[in-house]
Amino acid sequence: MHQAQYYKKVDSKITCLLCPQGCMINPGEVGLCQVRYNNEGKLWALNFGQISSKNLDPIEKKPLYHFKPGSMIYSIGALGCNLACPFCQNWSISQPKSYSTPENPEIMIEEGTSQTSAGEVVEEALNLKAQGNIGIAYTYNEPFMSYEFVLDCSKKAKEAGLVNVMVTNGMVNPKPLEELLPFIDAMNIDLKGIKQEVYDNLAGYLKPVLNTIKKAASLIHIELTNLIVPGLNDKEQDIAGLIDWIIANVGDKVPLHFCRYFPNYQYTQPPTPIKTLKLAEELALERGVKYVYLGNI
C-alpha cells in the first residue's frame, strides 16, 4: 500500500478529495472506486504499483489520431474506477468488487495484478523504443484512481524524455488535475453525454468532466470520445447538444470520436445501430467539427 494524497480526516472517517464523488470512508472500508482504503485514520492507495494490464499499442488505439500518429505507446492499467457504467467493457478491472472483501480489501491486489515500481515501468517503456514506443499511456481502467502511481510514473517518464498519455473519464477534482497536467502530453477524455441525467445512470457527475475538458484543452492536446449507447445518450437532440458544447467551449478542431456500444457487463441492449453513428457524424460535420471519427464499427 501507498499513502494516498487529497483527503481529510473527520473523526474516524476519511473524506477522499481526489474526485467529485467525495466518498466518506469508514475505518476498514474503501471508497466507490474500491481502491482507496481507510486504515487507522489514513487513506491508502491499494492499487499503487499494481498493474492489471500492459501492452504496446498503436497510439490510434487510445484513440488519439492527431497526437504523434503512427507511433506506438506502452499502455498500462491498474484496478478501480469512480464511475459505475453498467456497459463497461473493462469491468473486471474497473469494478474489482469481486476481488475484495470487507475483512480484507487488500486481497484484490492479489488477483490478476503484478507489483511494479515507477522506475521499472519507465525502464520497460525505454526498452520498447526500438519497437517505436514514444512513452506511456495510462489506460484500461480509470487512471485517476491510480493517481499517486501515475504521478510518479509521469514525472520519471518526462525526465527520461518519454511522453505521457491518459485515457480517462475526466471526473477528477481541480487540484489533483492541476498538479498532474504539467507532466501529461495528451488525453483522450470520454464525454458520456451532455446531460446530468446520463451521468445519473453511471453514478457520476457531468460538470466536473466538462471542467476537466476545458482545463486540459487549454494546456495540452486532447481528443474526445462519445460512446453512443442505445436508450442512454442516442437521441439526436442530445448528440447535437454535445457537439454544440464542444464547439463553443474547446473549438471545432478538437478531434471527436463517436464509438459503437456492444453489450457487456450488466447491459444487454443490442449494439448501437450504424445509422446512429452515421447521424452523429453528419451532425458534427454540419455543425463545423473539423475532425470526426467513428469507432468499433
Image (cartoon, grey):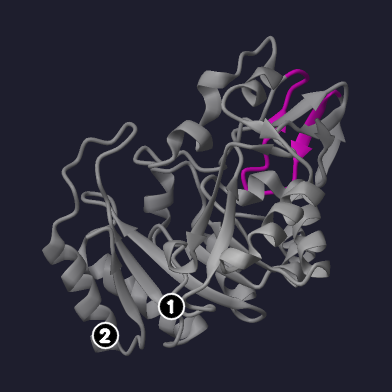
In this rendered view, identify the residue nearer to me: 197 or 186: 186
How many angstroms separate mark 2 from mark 1 (CA)?
A: 13 Å
Most prominent secondary structure in the magenta stretch?
A: loop
Q: Can you see residue 134?
A: no
Determine which of the numbered discs, if any, sits on residue 246 in the image: 1
Q: Secondary structure at mark 2?
A: helix
- Rendered image quadrant of residue 73: bottom right
Position of the C terminus by quadrant: bottom left
* Residue 20 located within the stretch drawn in magenta: yes
Residue sitting at the far front: 130
Residue drawn at x 20%, y 66% as measured from the top left: 277
Left or right of 259? Residue 230 is: left
Which of the two labelled residues, at mark 2 and mark 1, occupies the earlier sequence position?
Answer: 1
Residue at the image position 57 percent from the left and 69 percent from the top: 132
Label 1 crowding class (10 Å Cα cut-off): few <14, some 14-19, many 20+? many
Picture quarter containing residue 252?
bottom left
30 and 105: which one is in front?
105
Give the residue type at disc 2: Leu
Q: Which mark is residue 93?
A: none
Residue type marked 1 = Ile
**Magenta part of the chain:** 12-28
| Residue 173: percent from left, percent from top | 68, 56
Q: Which residue bears the numbered disc 2? A: 285
Left or right of 71: which side holds 27? right
Q: Position of residue 262 (x, y in %)?
A: 25, 46
How far across and how far down the image is residue 135, in percent? 65, 65
